[in-house]
Image (cartoon, grey):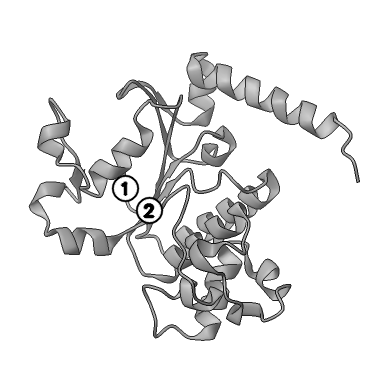
């Protein structure tokens, strides 16, 4: 993965997507988890980097992020407590949570409660994404971190991430998602099954391969069309 590029990791539940991210973060020892091969960063094996330096270079947003019983602003600025309110607001705008925050009674000073209990699942994910974007990391890891947001909000966030990488070309991203719309613009996409890569390419080339990715894309597009056509109660 070259600087400024995006890698998408997709596959059925249990295919090993999150495990790949945990290997990158060295939450698992790579030598014990992989029978052959390895993972490199900047042409050097991950195992050769001091763990603190490695994790400082990466930002990981989990599907169920952890928020502290503090204000929204404090949660966003967790890793950058000296950040200005303007910088916090800019990160929130990139994560498409700014407008939600302004609707709260105390705005950015609104307490979120224990584990963010006062926020919806999508709001918690977006606060965690804002937290990650506030820090100057080289690699953003999104582990199904858009699963609780609607497709329009997902598109806004992904568009902002693309703009951010244009402005900061050294920043890259790895996006794990069960929703293929999240990886359509990725430079590279890997399809995993039982811990192995079964397909690789970009969105267009994977559709032409007519394998798991193409089949899942057609299914999800049909599902979205049916959802859009179904009347909802006011």
Does 135 appear above or below 58? below
In which quarter of the view is residue 17 placed? top left
Q: Earlier in the sequence, mark 1 or mark 2?
A: 1
- The residue that label 2 is drawn on is 172
> Which residue is more in the foreground, 45 or 62?
62
Callout 1–callout 2 Cβ contact below 8 Å: yes
Using residue 213 as the reference point, say whether residue 137 is left or right of it: left
Q: Which percent across, then down, holds residue 93?
A: 60, 68
Residue 9 can be seen, yes or no = yes
- Residue at 91% across / 46% down in the picture? 234
Q: What is the C-alpha distance between the residues marked 1 and 2?
A: 8 Å
Q: Which percent across, then down, holds residue 34?
A: 16, 30
Under circle 2, the secondary element is strand
- Residue at 49% across / 17% down in the picture? 212
> Which residue is more in the foreground, 92 or 173?
92
Residue 127 can be seen, yes or no = no
**Residue 24's disc number:** none
């Amino acid at each position: 993965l070259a600087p400024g590029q995006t890698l998408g990791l997709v596959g059925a539940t249990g295919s090993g997507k999150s495990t790949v991210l945990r290997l990158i973060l060295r939450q698992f020892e790579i030598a014990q988890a992989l029978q052959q091969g390895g993972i490199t960063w900047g042409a050097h094996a991950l195992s050769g980097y001091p763990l603190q330096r490695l994790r400082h270079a990466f930002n990981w947003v989990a599907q169920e992020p952890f928020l502290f019983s503090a204000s929204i602003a404090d949660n966003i600025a967790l890793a950058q407590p000296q950040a200005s309110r303007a910088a916090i607001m800019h990160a929130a705008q990139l994560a498409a949570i700014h407008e939600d925050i302004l609707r709260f009674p105390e705005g950015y000073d609104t307490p979120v409660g224990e584990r963010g209990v006062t926020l919806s699942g999508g709001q918690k994910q977006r606060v965690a994404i804002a937290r990650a974007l506030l820090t100057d990391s080289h690699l953003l890891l999104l582990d199904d971190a858009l699963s609780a947001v609607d497709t329009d909000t997902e598109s806004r966030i992904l568009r902002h991430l693309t703009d951010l990488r244009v402005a900061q070309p050294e920043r890259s991203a790895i996006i794990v998602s069960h929703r293929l719309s999240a990886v359509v613009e990725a430079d590279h996409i890997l399809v995993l099954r039982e811990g192995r890569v079964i397909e690789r390419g970009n969105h267009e080339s994977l559709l032409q391969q007519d394998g798991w990715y193409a089949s899942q894309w057609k299914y999800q597009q049909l599902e979205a069309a049916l959802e859009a056509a179904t009347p909802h109660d006011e």
